[in-house]
Image (spheres, rainbow, N blue to C red):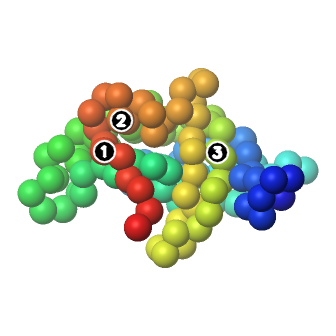
């Protein structure tokens, strides 16, 4: 726990991205050390990319494909924050020192997302 609040500190892990699902969600295998790992779905914290169905599909395909090129199959750092209502890990993900959520916003591939 943080000394100044009751909020627990997020955990930071080495991981590998096994599949990009869409512009703001990926499957990752998290390395816990000692030869222990597990797979989970990570939703990128703070961003919302276009949905893969409906009228936003063309933009969603571009966003997904750009994220795939950036992180799929690569070693990343995952900082977990919480679990969302879909049981996905809300996470900040870095690849080669680049915060993927910040990159998505800068590239115009996603919009800011704040919890309601």
Q: Are marks 3 and 2 in contact (CB under 8 Å)?
A: no
The residue at the point 59 percent across, 24 percent down is: 96
Mark 2 highlights which residue? 105
| Proximity of marks 1 and 2: CB atoms separated by less than 8 Å | yes
Residue under pointer 3: 78
- Cα gap from disc 1 to disc 3, whole angstroms: 20 Å
Q: How many discs appear? A: 3
Residue 38 in the image: above or below residue 11 = below
Most foreground residue, 53 or 44: 44
Q: Quadrant of residue 75?
A: top right
Q: CA distance from mark 3 to mark 2?
A: 18 Å
What is the x, y in percent for residue 51? 24, 57
Q: Measuring 23% from the left and 45% from the top, which residue is drawn there?
A: 61
Q: Looking at the picture, how far across and down is residue 13, in whole percent?
A: 73, 45
Query: Which residue is pictured at 31% across the width and 28% down the height?
Result: 107
Q: Which residue is mark 1?
A: 111
Q: Residue at x 23, y 57 (%)?
A: 52
Residue 107 versus residue 73 in the image, above or below: above
Q: Position of residue 35 (x, y in %)?
A: 85, 51
């Amino acid at each position: 726990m943080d000394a100044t609040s009751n909020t627990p500190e997020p955990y930071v892990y080495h991981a590998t991205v096994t599949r990009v699902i869409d512009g703001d969600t990926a499957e990752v295998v998290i390395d816990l050390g000692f030869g222990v790992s597990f797979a989970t779905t990570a939703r990128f914290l703070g961003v919302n990319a276009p949905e893969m169905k409906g009228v936003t599909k063309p933009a969603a395909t571009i966003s997904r494909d750009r994220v795939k090129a950036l992180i799929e199959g690569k070693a990343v750092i995952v900082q977990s924050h919480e679990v969302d209502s879909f049981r996905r890990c809300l996470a900040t993900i870095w690849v080669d020192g680049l915060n993927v959520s910040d990159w998505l916003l800068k590239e115009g591939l996603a919009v800011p997302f704040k919890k309601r």
